[in-house]
């Protein structure tokens, strides 16, 4: 249990049987009336964000979420197989739990896996990943403008929108949260 003075970003609360993570919070002391805490909560499983207000000093049930670094090994049917670097235990995590980041997973990539009572909740990839373009339409010579984009397939099979001058073999820096192009990687 925790009260509102213990709130911090990342804390996971158990509200109505659902795990909700605090995204942001603000203590408010109005001139009249009791103090309260305004929070933005993200449902750990669905990702849905809701606003919720708590009266100051209210006790709220917290959930223990274990975050550990794991290495992505391979994709097996509908499961993604990860290995704990300390115990060498392997676990299979369903595609829906891995989420959109599944399109940017490379073998031997280290990710953070969050679990609650042994049940995987979500997988957190590094914010930026470097992937090579395996297919895209050829760029037009001399077209260095940022006016247009085209689809490109990267080595994991995911499709991202890239500027027109990107070619097959280019290494790209991609934001794993939304799949957006961040730039080219030299080398």
Image (cartoon, helix red, strand yellow):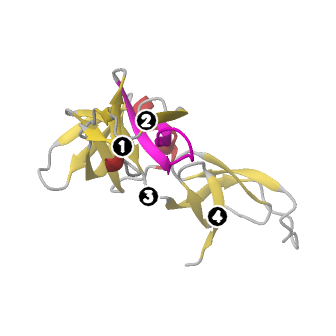
Which dot, 2 or 1, sits closer to the camera?
Answer: 2
Instruction: Of the two numbered discs 3 and 1 on the same chain, state the one appearing first in sequence.
Output: 1
Instruction: Please report the bounds of the magenta region as a residue range.
Output: 18-42
Q: Does the magenta stretch include residue 142?
A: no
Q: Residue 55 carries which label?
A: 2
**Can you say which quadrant of the picture contains the N terminus?**
top left
**Residue 56 x %, y %:** 40, 40
Q: Do the residues labelled 2 and 1 touch (CB within 8 Å)?
A: yes
**Residue 25 x %, y %:** 48, 48
Return the residue at label 4: 182
Instruction: Of the two numbered discs 4 and 1 on the same chain, state the one appearing first in sequence.
Output: 1
Q: Which mark is residue 126?
A: 3
Q: In this view, does 141 lie to the left or right of 116?
A: right
Return the residue at label 1: 4
Q: Do the residues labelled 4 and 1 touch (CB within 8 Å)?
A: no
Answer few, some or many: residues within 10 Å of disc 4's Cα (few below 14, many 20 plus, some between 14 and 19): some
**Whole-number angstrom distance, CA of label 3 to CA of label 2:** 36 Å
Q: Is mark 2 on a helix, strand or loop?
A: strand
Answer few, some or many: residues within 10 Å of disc 1's Cα (few below 14, many 20 plus, some between 14 and 19): some
């Amino acid at each position: 249990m925790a009260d509102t003075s213990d709130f911090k970003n990342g804390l996971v609360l158990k509200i109505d049987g659902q795990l909700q993570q605090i995204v942001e919070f603000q203590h408010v002391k109005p001139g009249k009336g009791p103090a309260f805490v305004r929070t933005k909560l993200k449902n750990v499983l669905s990702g849905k964000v809701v606003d919720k207000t708590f009266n100051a000093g209210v006790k709220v049930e917290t959930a223990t979420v274990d975050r550990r670094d794991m290495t992505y090994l391979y994709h097996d049917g509908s499961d993604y197989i990860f290995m704990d670097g300390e115990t060498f235990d392997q676990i299979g995590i369903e595609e829906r739990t891995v989420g959109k980041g599944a399109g940017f997973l490379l073998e031997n990539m280290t990710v953070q896996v969050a679990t609650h009572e042994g049940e995987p909740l979500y997988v957190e990839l590094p914010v930026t990943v470097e992937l090579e373009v395996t297919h895209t339409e050829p760029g037009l010579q001399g077209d260095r403008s940022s006016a247009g984009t085209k689809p490109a397939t990267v080595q994991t099979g995911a499709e991202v929108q890239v500027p027109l001058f990107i070619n097959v073999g280019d290494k790209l820096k991609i934001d794993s949260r939304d799949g957006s192009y961040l730039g080219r990687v030299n080398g």
